Amino acid sequence: MTLPAPDSLPDFQSMFPDEEHCADYLFALRWPRGFRCATCRVKAIVHTDGWGGYGGLREMGYRHKAVVQGDATNAAWALPMIHREFGNPKVWLKGTHHGRVERQHLQAYLNEFVFRHNRRFWPFSAFQRVLSLGLEAPVQTYRQLYDADEYGRDVHLAGMEG
């Protein structure tokens, strides 16, 4: 199953107007046939939040215990950090790329965001890592950057571990 991907920032915003739509898309992308834990035994109790995407757990043989704290409309208040984590890349893409995000480059932009986000408390180590990547990595040509497949799966540096 191939899921549609946004071609531009307006497409991204229309496909993902809120965190729930984004989470549903990522869940379907990661687990197209539904989630199945490789280490859990069948009949295990799976504790989750009240998100509707976990509805198929019962059909897969799991016992599902949803724990909901308050009303769903208060989710941003109950779990502010996760809402901030989903909101940060959206704001970064809007601010940094001014609405010009092509599908083939989206993965590279998200990789850059994750790199910066994971090193936000240690800016010098991020600088050192960028220097080492620059010294170790082969030079990328314009053609190599634009030859990435439609979903940006070919944007990683070959042989580089991050």
Image: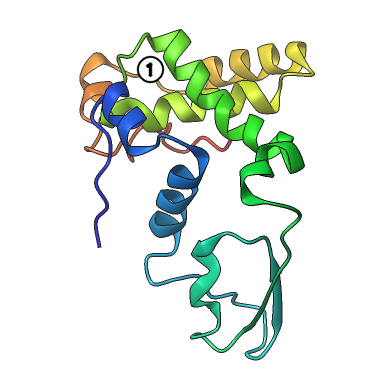
The image quarter containing residue 100 is top left
Structure colour scheme = rainbow
Give me the residue at 48% from left, 24% from top: 90
SS label for mark 1: loop
- For the C terminus, the image quarter is top right
- Is residue 55 depicted above or below 4 in this figure? below
Q: List x then y, in percent, for residue 73.
A: 62, 44
- Relative depth, front residue between 20 and 92: 20
Residue at the disc numbered 1: 139
- Is residue 106 depicted above or below 23 in this figure? above
The image quarter containing residue 81 is top right
Left or right for 140, reference 34: left
- For the N terminus, the image quarter is bottom left
Q: List x then y, in percent, for residue 30.
A: 44, 58
Give me the residue at 69% from left, 14% from top: 128
Circle 1 crowding by C-alpha within 10 Å: few under 14, some 14–19, many from 20: few
